[in-house]
């Protein structure tokens, strides 16, 4: 490293910071201009140089305007200074709970010849950055910062002032568990190098000014109670937005200059390792996203939060390495020392990060309770998968009861006490009478298919339309395999699909889907608000508002087609567990799965889609007969 690139980037950042500060100075000059004019008029009047005529009235008018402008400027300045900037929710790590991690970061800062970060925190995301927390509302007093439960000790030793000098280093928690120590050091080098330019007084002052304006704009945009407060906040918001727009371009270029200087400086440390480690960053992001959407989300919906998400991402990425040819060779890294060994108690940190992830992505409470309890990976199939399926199946039958659907519509099947899968299959089956009564189902369904087999015989194929059905099944098989390799999918092996409710088979199928959607909406409305009522026990409890949770919802609302497919799949899985000895399982990449004779039932999705879209139960009944599942037997529900 020659230092030329570092100096160029730093100089560019400083010049942009000075441009931001000049905007602040101009705003101050505009506020002081009426006061300066008033001083000139008053001095001229007292000395006799400006007197007589209309000057007396002008002097009083200008003085009054100056007083009003000064009061408004002082109020806006106080508003900006007291506005609390946005802070990323994190899990703070005390130095005595991770001495090796702090030592590694301190050594890295020494090698880069930059100030060490003031603290280290973890975030449940695949990213790392420096965060300024010098605002008085975000930094506890020095006497409180020594407590492990309230703050983090500085890397450079005890703080003599109230505010930390260097920013906080925020590390993505999946990196600690998936990456090796050398890879983590290489990835963090450009981030830690950013403390050098950040320590410059002009850059620090410009950042504080921009962050204060941003916080003031957010506070002014909040709904006010009275008309007077709304008027005042509207004026303050207009001024702060004007200043923020003036600073936006310079602030963006300043941050680019800081990043360029940090990246150039970091090339002197582990540059070759960093190139390899960047591959692990992308892999960790893919595994973390799959783990949250496929594994954690079903548990959160059931009131359970997996307490070892970071350990789960290692299992998910290991499974991905086994399946994906592009990931071959990555598992050989597992013999090296993982970065989580830098923590004294990685299990405690993983649990805290997992709870924070549940709060951010789902909006769960901050404390455990009867309806919000941790679950381990060993208990996940029974505590989450089994309960999810049986709860969905019970909801399905409640909606059928509300629609007045009989226990069975097949005259050859004897009525039994209790909910059965046959009741669902018979209700969703398109018969010849349905086709003759409704040539075109609402929403563009496909009731024209008349060759449905007798539901009483799961092995008898339909007499006609066999070739068309096989072609349609092939399309569903292809769609299913694409869903397994891509990002589409949901619990129980049902793909998310396109969300088009027009593909439902009959009017009563669409009515059932609408009833399930309404029932889910009622249950969610009746559930207590998870984001409030409890106080976060971690050190960041004053840095963000519980009413904003969830900050990052994982998935958009499901369509009626998706909800119906999930509930029908849940009912099939319940019947398989109660009549065929199947067990619930956990797939690290696809979430809850059904295990029949120790093998995953991956071919269930196209048959469920054929039933709900076309009203044809023949492929599904053949699959049930082949798997030894008795649809006429009652199942146990929640």
Image (cartoon, rainbow, N blue to C red):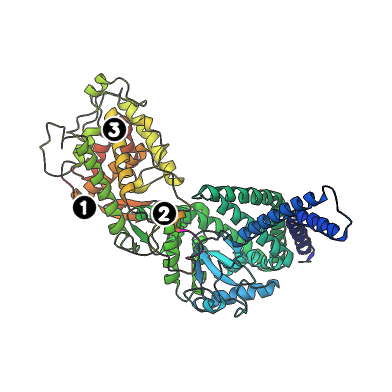
Q: Main secondary structure of the magenta part?
A: loop
Whether residue 169 is visible: yes
Mark 3 in CB contact with mark 2 (< 8 angstroms): no
- Between discs 3 and 1, the one toward the N terminus: 3
Residue 397 position, x and y percent, is: 22, 42
Describe residue 615's horizontal placement relative to residue 229 as left or right.
left
Secondary-structure class at tag 3: helix
Q: Which residues are the magenta region? A: 541-545
| For discs 3 and 1, the disc positioned in front in the rendered view | 3
> Which badge, 2 or 1, is on the more N-terminal residue?
2
- Residue positioned 64% across, 73% down in the render: 116
Residue 416 x %, y %: 11, 41
Q: Which residue is mark 2?
A: 362
Q: Residue at x 31, y 35 (%)?
A: 514
At x 64%, y 70%, the residue is: 166
Is 556 on the left-hand or right-hand side of 401? Answer: right
Lower sequence index among marks 3 and 2 = 2
**Extreme right residue here?**
49
- Rendered view: 308 above or below 152: above
| 287 w.r.t. 186: above or below | above
Residue ID for mark 3 = 511
Q: Quadrant of residue 130?
A: bottom right
CA separation in Å, label 2 and label 1 = 33 Å
- Crowd rating for badge 2 (residues with CA inside 10 Å; few <14, some 14–19, many 20+): many
Q: Are marks 3 and 1 in contact (CB under 8 Å)?
A: no
Question: Which residue is nearer to you in this view: 271 or 327?
Answer: 271
Q: Residues within 10 Å of mark 3 (few under 14, many from 20)?
A: some
Q: Is residue 598 visible?
A: no
Q: Which residue is mark 1?
A: 581
Q: Is residue 398 left or right of residue 144?
A: left
Left or right, 560 with reference to 129: left
């Amino acid at each position: 490293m020659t230092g030329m690139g570092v100096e160029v980037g730093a100089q560019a950042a400083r010049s942009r910071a000075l441009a931001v500060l000049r905007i602040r100075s101009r705003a101050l000059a505009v506020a002081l201009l009426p006061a300066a004019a008033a001083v000139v008029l008053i001095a001229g009047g007292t000395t006799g140089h400006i007197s007589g005529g209309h000057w007396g009235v002008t002097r009083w008018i200008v003085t009054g305007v100056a007083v009003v402008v000064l009061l408004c400027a002082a109020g806006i300045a106080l508003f900006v200074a007291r506005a609390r900037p946005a802070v990323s929710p994190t899990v703070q790590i005390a130095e005595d709970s991770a001495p090796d991690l702090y030592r590694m970061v301190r050594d890295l800062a020494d090698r880069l010849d930059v100030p060490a970060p003031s603290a280290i925190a973890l975030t449940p995301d695949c990213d790392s950055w420096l965060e300024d927390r010098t605002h008085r509302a975000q930094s506890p007093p020095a006497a409180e910062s020594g407590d492990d439960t309230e703050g983090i000790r500085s890397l450079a030793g005890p703080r003599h002032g109230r505010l930390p000098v260097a920013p906080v280093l925020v590390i993505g928690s999946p990196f600690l568990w998936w990456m090796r120590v050398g890879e983590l050091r290489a990835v963090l080098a450009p981030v830690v190098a950013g403390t050098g330019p950040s320590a410059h007084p002009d850059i620090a002052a410009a950042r504080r000014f921009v962050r204060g304006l941003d916080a003031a704009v957010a506070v002014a945009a909040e709904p006010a109670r009275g008309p007077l407060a709304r008027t005042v906040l509207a004026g303050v918001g207009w001024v702060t937005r004007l200043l923020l727009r003036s600073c936006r371009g310079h602030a963006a270029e300043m941050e680019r200059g800081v990043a360029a200087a940090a990246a150039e400086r970091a090339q002197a440390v582990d540059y070759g390792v960093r190139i390899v480690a960047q591959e692990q960053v992308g892999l960790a992001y893919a595994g973390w996203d799959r783990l949250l959407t496929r594994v954690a989300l079903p548990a959160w919906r059931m009131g359970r939060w997996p307490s070892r998400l970071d350990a789960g991402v290692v299992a998910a990425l290991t499974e991905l390495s086994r399946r994906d040819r592009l990931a071959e060779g990555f598992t050989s890294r597992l013999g090296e020392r993982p970065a989580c060994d830098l923590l004294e108690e990685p299990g405690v940190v993983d649990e805290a990060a997992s709870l924070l992830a549940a709060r951010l992505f789902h909006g769960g409470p901050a404390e455990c309770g009867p309806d919000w309890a941790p679950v381990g990976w060993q208990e996940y199939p029974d505590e989450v998968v089994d309960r999810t399926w049986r709860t969905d199946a019970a909801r399905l039958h409640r909606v059928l009861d509300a629609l007045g659907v009989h226990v069975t519509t097949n005259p050859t099947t004897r009525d039994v006490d209790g909910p059965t899968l046959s009741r669902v299959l018979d209700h969703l089956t398109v018969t010849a009478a349905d086709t003759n009564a409704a040539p075109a189902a609402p929403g563009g369904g496909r009731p024209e298919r008349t060759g449905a087999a007798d539901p009483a015989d799961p092995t008898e194929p339909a007499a006609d339309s066999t070739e068309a059905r096989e072609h349609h099944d092939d399309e569903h098989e292809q769609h299913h395999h694409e869903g397994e390799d891509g990002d589409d999918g949901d619990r129980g092996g049902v793909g998310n699909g396109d969300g088009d409710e027009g593909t439902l088979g009959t009017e009563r199928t669409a009515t059932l889907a609408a009833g399930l959607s309404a029932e889910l909406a009622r249950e969610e409305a009746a559930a207590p608000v998870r984001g409030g009522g409890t106080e976060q026990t971690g050190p960041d409890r004053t840095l963000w508002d519980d009413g904003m949770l969830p900050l990052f919802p994982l998935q958009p609302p499901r369509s009626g087609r998706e909800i119906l497919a999930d509930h029908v799949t849940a009912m099939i899985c319940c019947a398989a567990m109660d009549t065929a000895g199947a067990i619930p399982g956990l797939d690290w990449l696809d979430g809850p799965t059904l295990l029949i004779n120790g093998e995953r039932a991956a071919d269930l999705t196209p048959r469920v889609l054929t039933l709900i879209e076309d009203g044809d139960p023949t492929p599904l009944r053949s699959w049930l007969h082949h798997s030894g599942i008795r649809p006429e037997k009652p199942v146990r529900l929640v």
